[in-house]
Amino acid sequence: MYIELFLLDNALMDLLILRLAAAMRGTRLYKGRAALGCFTGALYALWAACWPPAGCLAAKVAFGLLLAMALSPRGWRDYGLGVLCLFTAAFLVGGLAFALAMATGGRIENGAVWGGIPLRTALVTALAASFLPRAIRRILRRKKLGMVTLTMLQDGKRRILAGMVDSLKQCQTPQEVYDRYLQITGYCKCCVDC
């Protein structure tokens, strides 16, 4: 394996873990801190690969405590919550990667997990999928931003109209809103008033 691919794989895994931890915590992940955390995580993985004692459990926990700073804590209690979310995300993502490797015909050899498909492909797919919820929320928020629902009761009949805010901005009185409603729906005044 090339060293740059090794570093990229570890940086992508760290980014995935940080995004998941930030989502669990209900806060935003800042790009600069995320990039610094991913870079530091890739260097730690390289250090642990070159010097085996750096890969012991105590060193991993210490690095996790350092990586939790990328979640921008606002105090000790928030930092503790960030650490908890980070380790939970690491266990979830690590378990998912292990399960994916084993399900695709992978094997464990010399303490390393070898996947049946290139794990890099799975990591890039998971990373891309982790950005989808935000994009979908943004699209839905933009769609709702320009819409207004108007409910009118007339002669015991309930009429609901969803329209663009721009089309109702010029209306200043209820009569103008009613006239605009007739114009948008295509009803004539005599049909509605009957």
Image (cartoon, rainbow, N blue to C red):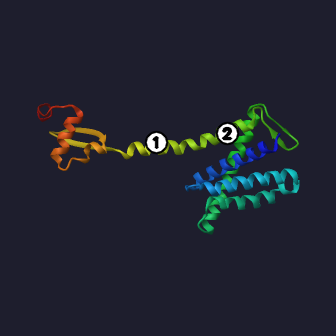
Q: Residue 75 lies in what quarter of the image?
A: bottom right
For the question of whether residue 10 can be seen, the reply is yes
Q: Amino acid at mark 1?
A: Ile
Identify the residue at horizontal 67%, vertical 39% (top origin).
124
Identify the residue at horizontal 58%, vertical 51% (top origin).
23
- The tag on residue 139 is 1
| Closer to the camera in the image, 145 or 115 | 145
Q: How far apart, in angstroms, are the residues tagged by discs 1 and 2?
A: 23 Å
Residue 69 position within the rendered picture, expressed as x and y whole percent measured from the top left: 66, 62
The reply, left or right, for residue 47 in relation to residue 160 is: right
Location of the C terminus (image quadrant): top left
The residue that label 2 is drawn on is: 124
Residue 114 position within the rendered picture, expressed as x and y whole percent measured from the top left: 81, 37
Q: Amino acid at mark 2?
A: Val
- The tag on residue 25 is none
Location of the N terminus (image quadrant): top right
Label 1, residues with CA under 10 Å away: few <14, some 14-19, many ≥20? few
User: Which element carries disc 2, helix, strand or loop?
Assistant: helix
Figure check: 74 above or below 170: below
| Closer to the camera in the image, 136 or 170 | 170
